[in-house]
């Protein structure tokens, strides 16, 4: 997720490390905060792999500021990851939202729709946080614990909203463009 966020934000524009960290934190919020101890080694790995580079700019103090910018290989890597995301980027909600934040860079609507269809297929499979002794998913209606029942109800509502958005967005992406004259 961190690599995808770095590539995605730098695809938009070159950034200083602090600006990049602020944008990633804004995207992931309190759910998955990014620390300097995770961000800067990830930047170093991407730089070593030739996906980004640093350039020095005059700073406000004595030390120059480092601006991070994607290379052409970095841009290509983001597009590859957007077109063919790992399964965890489909099944994990925060990772999927990170992917979705940059999916507009994949300028091919059918390929965008294919990614969204993978998420829709995942959401359509029966699942639960809790299972009974026979391995069947426990529904909110069958859960006596009010706290677990609440988790299940919130998850159901969130999934329903996401499915509606996915259906609508897939239909929009698959609509012929430009619209045929009537």
Image: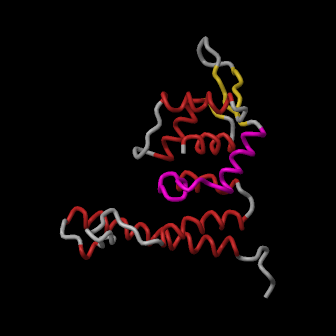
Where does the image place residue 125, in percent across and percent down from the top left? Answer: 46, 71
Which residue is more in the foreground, 22 or 97?
A: 97
Q: Residue at 62% across / 54% down in the picture? A: 85
Answer with left or right where residue 139 lies relative to residue 178.
Answer: left
Where does the image place residue 73, in percent across and percent down from the top left? Answer: 76, 39
Our reading of the magenta stretch's main secondary structure is helix
Q: Residue 45: which quarter of the image?
A: top right
Looking at the picture, the colour scheme in use is: secondary structure
Work out which residue is located at the far bottom of the displayed protein and give it. 182
Work out which residue is located at the far front of the displayed protein and give it. 134
Q: Is residue 130 above or below residue 96?
A: below
Does the magenta run of residues contain 139?
Answer: no
Tell me the magenta residue range. 72-95
Where is the N terminus found, in terms of image quarters? top right
Where does the image place residue 26, in percent across and percent down from the top left? Answer: 49, 44
Q: Residue at 52% across / 51% down in the picture? A: 95
Answer with left or right where residue 25 lies relative to residue 55.
Answer: left
Q: Is residue 107 above or below residue 49?
A: below
Q: Residue at 72% across / 68% down in the picture? A: 110
Which residue is more in the foreground, 121 or 149?
A: 121
Q: Residue 176: which quarter of the image?
A: bottom right
Where is the C terminus found, in terms of image quarters? bottom right
Where does the image place residue 169, in percent across and percent down from the top left? Answer: 61, 70
Does the magenta run of residues contain 74?
Answer: yes
Answer with left or right where residue 118 lies relative to residue 173.
Answer: left
């Amino acid at each position: 997720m961190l690599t995808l966020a770095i590539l995605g934000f730098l695809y938009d524009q070159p950034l200083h490390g602090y600006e990049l960290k602020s944008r990633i934190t804004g995207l992931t919020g309190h759910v998955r905060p990014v620390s300097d101890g995770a961000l800067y080694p990830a930047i170093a790995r991407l730089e070593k792999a030739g996906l980004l580079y640093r350039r020095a700019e005059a700073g406000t103090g004595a030390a120059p500021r480092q601006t991070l910018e994607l290379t052409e290989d970095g841009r290509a890597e983001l597009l590859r990851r957007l077109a063919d995301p790992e399964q965890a980027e489909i099944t994990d909600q925060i990772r999927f939202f990170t992917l979705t934040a940059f999916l507009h860079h994949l300028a091919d609507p059918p390929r965008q729709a294919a990614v969204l269809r993978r998420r829709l297929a995942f959401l359509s499979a029966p699942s639960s946080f809790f299972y009974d002794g026979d391995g069947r998913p426990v529904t909110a209606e069958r859960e006596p614990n009010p706290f677990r029942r609440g988790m299940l109800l919130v998850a159901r509502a969130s999934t329903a909203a996401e499915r509606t958005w996915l259906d609508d967005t897939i239909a929009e992406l698959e609509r012929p463009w430009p619209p045929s004259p009537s």
